[in-house]
Image (spheres, helix red, strand yellow):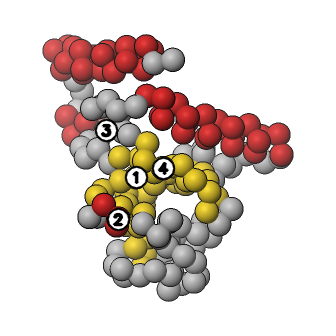
C-alpha cells in the first residue's frame, strides 16, 4: 500500500503507486520516502510508517507538519517548535533508544521529518496488553528509561 499524504485525501493506494489514484497528488517524498501506513495524529500533524526506497526499503517514519492552531502567530510558533524538534533530534545524534533523524525538508508547501523506525510497542500499548503493572515491572521501565533521560539532558 502507498498512503496519500494530501491532508484532504489520505487515500490508500496500491503498492508502488507514484501518484494518488484519488486526488492525483505525489505520494513519494523526495523521490525516496514512501508512506505505507497511517500511524496516528496529534496537534502538530500526522505520522506514517514508511520505507526509504533508496536504502533497500529500509523502514522509517514520516512526520507531516499539520498544525491545528489558527492565526498567524500560533502558526508561526507551531512552525518554530516543529523546526526546533528537528534541530533537537539532530543534536541528539545516535542513541539506541532515540530514533535517528534522517531528513527534514519542505515539499509541496508542507514540512516533514523523517526518522528511523524503531519496531515495538509504545508504553500505552504495553499498558493495554499487560494491564496494571506491578512494582517490579515499573522499576524495570524506569531503570531502562533513566539513562535515556540522562543522555537527553547531557546533550546541549
Q: Given contact means CB atoms under 8 Å apart, are the residues at marks 3 and 1 in contact? A: no
- Reading the image, the residue beneath label 1 is 61
**Residue 141 x, y percent position in the rendering:** 24, 21
In this image, 121 relative to 77: left or right?
left
Residue 128 visible? no
Upstream in the sequence, badge 4 or badge 3?
A: 4
154 versus 60 height, above or below: above
Tell me how far mark 1 sits from mark 4, CA to CA.
10 Å
Upstream in the sequence, badge 1 or badge 2?
A: 2
Tell me how far mark 4 sits from mark 3, CA to CA.
23 Å
Q: Which mark is residue 122?
A: 3
- Reading the image, the residue beneath label 2 is 54
Upstream in the sequence, badge 4 or badge 2?
A: 2
Q: Nearer the viewer, mark 1 or mark 2?
A: 2
Q: Nearer the viewer, mark 3 or mark 1?
A: 1
Q: Which mark is residue 75?
A: none
Check disc 2: other Cα within 10 Å, few if <14, some if 14-19, many if 20+. few
**Residue 87 x, y percent position in the rendering:** 55, 34
Mark 3 falls on what kind of element?
loop
Tell me how far mark 3 sits from mark 2, CA to CA.
28 Å
Amino acid at each position: 500500500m502507498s498512503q496519500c499524504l494530501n491532508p484532504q485525501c489520505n487515500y490508500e493506494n496500491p503498492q508502488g503507486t507514484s501518484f494518488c489514484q484519488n486526488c492525483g497528488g505525489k505520494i513519494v517524498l523526495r523521490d525516496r520516502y514512501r508512506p505505507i501506513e497511517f500511524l496516528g495524529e496529534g496537534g502538530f500533524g500526522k505520522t506514517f510508517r514508511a520505507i526509504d526506497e533508496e536504502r533497500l526499503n529500509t523502514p522509517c517514519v514520516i512526520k507531516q507538519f499539520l498544525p491545528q492552531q489558527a492565526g498567524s502567530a500560533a502558526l508561526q510558533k507551531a512552525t518554530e517548535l516543529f523546526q526546533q524538534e528537528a534541530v533537537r533530534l539532530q543534536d541528539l545524534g545516535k542513541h539506541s533508544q532515540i530514533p535517528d533523524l534522517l531528513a527534514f525538508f519542505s515539499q509541496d508547501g508542507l514540512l516533514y521529518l523523517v526518522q528511523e523506525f524503531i519496531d515495538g510497542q509504545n508504553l500505552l500499548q504495553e499498558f493495554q496488553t499487560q494491564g496494571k503493572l506491578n512494582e517490579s515491572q515499573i522499576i524495570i521501565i524506569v531503570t531502562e528509561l533513566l539513562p535515556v533521560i540522562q543522555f537527553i539532558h547531557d546533550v546541549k
